[in-house]
Amino acid sequence: MISVTNLSKKIGDVQALNKLSFSAQDGHITGLLGPNGAGKTTCLRTLFGLLTPDEGYAEVDGINVAEKPIQAKQQLGLFPDPFGLYERLTPREYITYFAELSGMSRKEAKAATENVIEQLNLGDISNRRCKGFSQGQRMKTALAQAIVHQPTNIILDEPTRGLDVMSTRLLRDILIDLKSRGHCVLFSSHVMQEVAALCDHVIVMANGSVVATGSPDELCQQTGESSLEEAFIKLIGTDEGIAA
Amino acid sequence: MNKLIAMVRKELIDAARDKRSVMAGLYYAIGTPLIMCGMFMVLINQLTSPEDLNITINKAENAPDLVRYLSRKGINQADLAASPDADVKAITLTITEDYAANMAKAKPAEVIILADNSDEKLQNSIRRLQQELQTYSSEMGSLRLIARGINPQVMQSLKVDMQDQSTPDSKGGMILGIAIFTMIYSVFISAMNLAIDTSAGERERNSLALMLSHPISTRQLVLGKVIAVTLFALLGLVLILLISKIAYTFVPWQELGFSINISTDFMQLMFVIGIPVALLASTLQLFVSFMAKSFKEAQSYLTMVLFVPIALSMAASYNIAPDVLQWIPVSGQQQALMDFIKGKDIPMLQLAVSSTMTVVISIGLMLGMEKMLKSEKVVFGL
């Protein structure tokens, strides 16, 4: 479970987060929906303790991130934007390395890497260096890195960007699989279709604070619109920065 | 501990596959000793002047005795007709018309040397000619005194007896200084590219934030990087030591009257002393690279920063303010190594102080990096 309470953060002159509060439950896929510049990435970085909030706090499985960053991060897996691959390492080395950083012994990390390679069908590229990978191959490698240590909570920052249909479908299946196994999945997006298709719970963000929460259907009902896209535009009051 | 080992292993694999880092270290470690050897060979050729000095003597017939004397000393009238490729120096000795007459009357007989004294290549030859003329002059003087019944020793008011205490090895101090400097500097050069790649480069590739999103402390992250870069620096040092040991045997040191022998003892000492220096090289360069926003910016900062060890090490070999420098990182180690190879006792206290200072500065830089990596600005390059 992930929860943030009253989070405020100013970056430069911009109030990136403004008294942001929400929670994401285990066994659910929660979408953080907002136009570009709404504060989605800032919020996720705060969850990892990479940014210190000016006010408020973030908790992962009840552990305060600011107070016990190591324990809190132990429960998290991150699919970052951008991916941060090491071009000179192979996916197998890359995934094992981050599994070890997450606290696994080398033996465990190697076994876990084999499992995740199997799960994501990475076998054919697992011994090639990441340099020159396609966007889909990069996505799979980054995703494998995020879930290799089986964290309770998985956070994805704009996961579907730049992916073709096949990769998007694969990603969707994996997220649904994680959900069914009781993980807490939180992802940020500005792609309506993704959110509508996947999420049990949507948090609509604009200008650093929560505008509305609920399931896609509930949001439509609240606003009296038939599609999530129309509902979203009504909620944030502008259609700027949205991809259909 | 597991995480630390994983980090060091990953950094080393990554670095070994990065041709740029490996090559920078290798080129320096292999190239420098070879360049130094070439330089020393040229230098030795310059210093040990050739047996025969060919010059132009005008009106040689006016002073046959002097010309004969010079030729006995290896200074010859150039004979271009006989050997056109002979190396003739641009020195002209002119014997005046009244030479013989003045010599006969025991008056100063005039000879003129015509040469460019600012030409460094000629200076030795000119000095040699002047010396021989001086010796001839005093020999003639002594003969005149004997002819007048006076002991020529009355002209010798001082008897200077120079007893040279330098050992053959200590004579090469200057050259040794340069040789040791290139070895110390190798840890800085070998560490450079990896230090930039693993800090500024890591941020540019967006993997720094990803690393910090994992349950590792910034201290572990800094330690992992420092250990990896230090190991790489030491690898460069080992390489240059091995290459130097082989290459320096080809230089004809004996012509200079001393020998440079990169002994196994020296190599071991250099390696042990090099460990704290390598630690300093890696922490200093990582620290500066983390401050830079991009790979290129880091490169330009480092070229400036690397001037400091060059200056310290050079100053130590040129004997500028040697007292203070004995206690300071890099120059302290350099002086200790020079003393060792000259066969003197190693100044243990100074070496201990400068090595301790090196380690203390490195720890300070590591703590500084740890603090920096907690700052959002550094991690995201804001």
Image: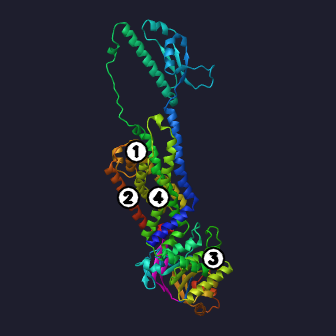
Image-quadrant location for residue A225? bottom right
Contact (Cβ within 8 Å) of mark 4 with mark 2: no
Measured from the top left, where is residue A87 in percent x and y?
A: 59, 67
Residue A227 in the figure: left or right of residue B168: right
Q: Identify the residue position indicated by label 4 in the image.
A: B285
Residue B349 position (above or below residue A176) = above
Q: On residue A123, which mark appears?
A: 3
Q: Identify the residue position indicated by label 2 in the image.
A: B359
Q: Residues within 10 Å of mark 2 (few under 14, many from 20)?
A: many
- Secondary structure, mark 2, is helix
Asked if residue B374 shows in the view, the reply is no
- Secondary structure, mark 4, is helix
Which residue occupies 33% across, 18% down? Answer: B156
- Secondary structure, mark 1, is helix
- Nearer mark to the viewer, of 4 and 2: 2
Instruction: Identify the magenta region.
Output: A1-26
Amino acid bearing label 4 = Gln
Q: Residues within 10 Å of mark 3 (few under 14, many from 20)?
A: some
- Nearer mark to the viewer, of 2 and 3: 3
Q: Identify the residue position indicated by label 1 in the image.
A: B341
Measured from the top left, where is residue B250 in percent x and y?
A: 52, 41
How far apart marks 2 and 1 lie (CA) works out to: 24 Å
Amino acid bearing label 3 = Gly
How far apart marks 3 and 4 lie (CA) works out to: 39 Å
Q: Are marks 2 and 3 on the same chain?
A: no
Chain of the residue that carries numbered disc 2 in the rendered image: B
